[in-house]
Image (cartoon, grey):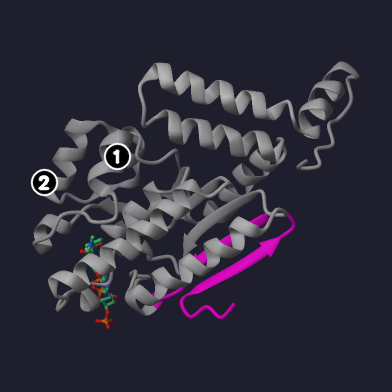
Amino acid sequence: MELKNIILEKSEHLAIVTINRPKALNALNSETLKDLDVVLDDLEKDNNIYCVILTGSGEKAFVAGADISEMKDLSEEEGRNFGLLGNKVFRRLEKLDKPVIAAISGFALGGGCELAMACDIRIASEKAKFAQPEAGLGITPGFGGTQRLPRLVGEGKAKELIYTCATIKADEALSIGLVNKVVPLESLMDEAKAMASLIMANAPIAVKLCKDAINRGMQVDIDKAVEIEAGDFGKCFATEDQKEGMTAFMERRAKNFSNK
Ligand code: DAK
């Protein structure tokens, strides 16, 4: 697997994916999106990985958006292809059968904010800044911003942010529910790893099915959503980890999950 703009590291059950184009503040060009696609192929197949942290290299930016220098002269067809590639990759990330924590050091703008929103959980440093500046560039958010932002922060706030292109700081992002937690920059990765450890202490298949139930259930009405939940709940009873989790509770001993 040869990656040009992404570093993939694995340690025990944790994978850390770092977008690594610091000279362009980690802006997403098509090369980087293709790298991410390859990384997702790998993570999808790797049953030994239970949780993923997605971050940007350097302290200044998580991702400063889609690459404006690449987008500037796109034709309509090229623009559509770029958008299709980005949307395909973001959707794969959102549906990955492992939880993904975005660790956001600095700028998360445009496609960067959208990438963070395609993750399950967002932890921001106190220096992080968020915006959807697309309307100021003559475009609409194209990697899911018009859809995921209102689902996360509500329609009114999403419209305000998208129409005004306002940049907000980490504390405001926390207050509107765009991020889960704000931490000092120095402890960003430690905090992300600590949250990953809490997640990885639980039964991986159950966590995966929780993600599936939440993601699919949020897109349908409540009657269908509880059917989805019941289906995923049922699947747990075909796992060894359900027996182990409940037996360990009854026997008052530590559980030992096997991801089976
Ligand atoms: N693209 C390309 N290069 C970028 C970049 C970006 N988004 N952001 C920064 N850079 C580059 C700068 O050009 C500069 O490169 P050099 O000049 O050194 O070669 C380097 O990174 C450092 O940036 P600055 O010199 O500008 O650093 P400052 O500290 O002065 O400013 C900044 C930092 C983050 C405030 C500023 O760089 C900035 O405003 N960047 C652009 C932020 C932005 O507008 N992002 C949103 C991009 S639009 C679509 C799908 C998705 C999208 C669109 C369509 N389709 C469906 C087709 C998504 C669109 C976006 O994300």
Magenta region includes residue 202: no
Residue denoted by label 2: 163
Magenta region includes residue 21: yes
Residue type indicated by callout 2: Tyr
Question: Ligand 1 quadrant?
Answer: bottom left
Residue denoted by label 1: 172
- Residue ID at (53%, 24%): 229
One can see residue 204 in this view: yes
Q: Which mark is residue 24?
A: none
Front-lying residue, 121 or 145: 145
- Residue ID at (60%, 42%): 195
Question: Relative to 121, is 252 on the left or the right?
Answer: right
161 vs 175: above or below: below
Judge: label 1 CB < 8 Å from ligand 1: no
User: Which quarter of the figure has residue 151?
Assistant: top left
- Lower sequence index among marks 1 and 2: 2
- Residue ID at (16%, 49%): 166
Q: Are marks 1 and 2 in contact (CB under 8 Å)?
A: no
Q: Classify the position of the C terminus by image quarter.
A: top right
255 vs 195: above or below: above
Q: Which residues are magenta?
A: 1-22
One can see residue 19 in this view: no
- Residue ID at (56%, 81%): 2
Which element is circle 1 on?
helix
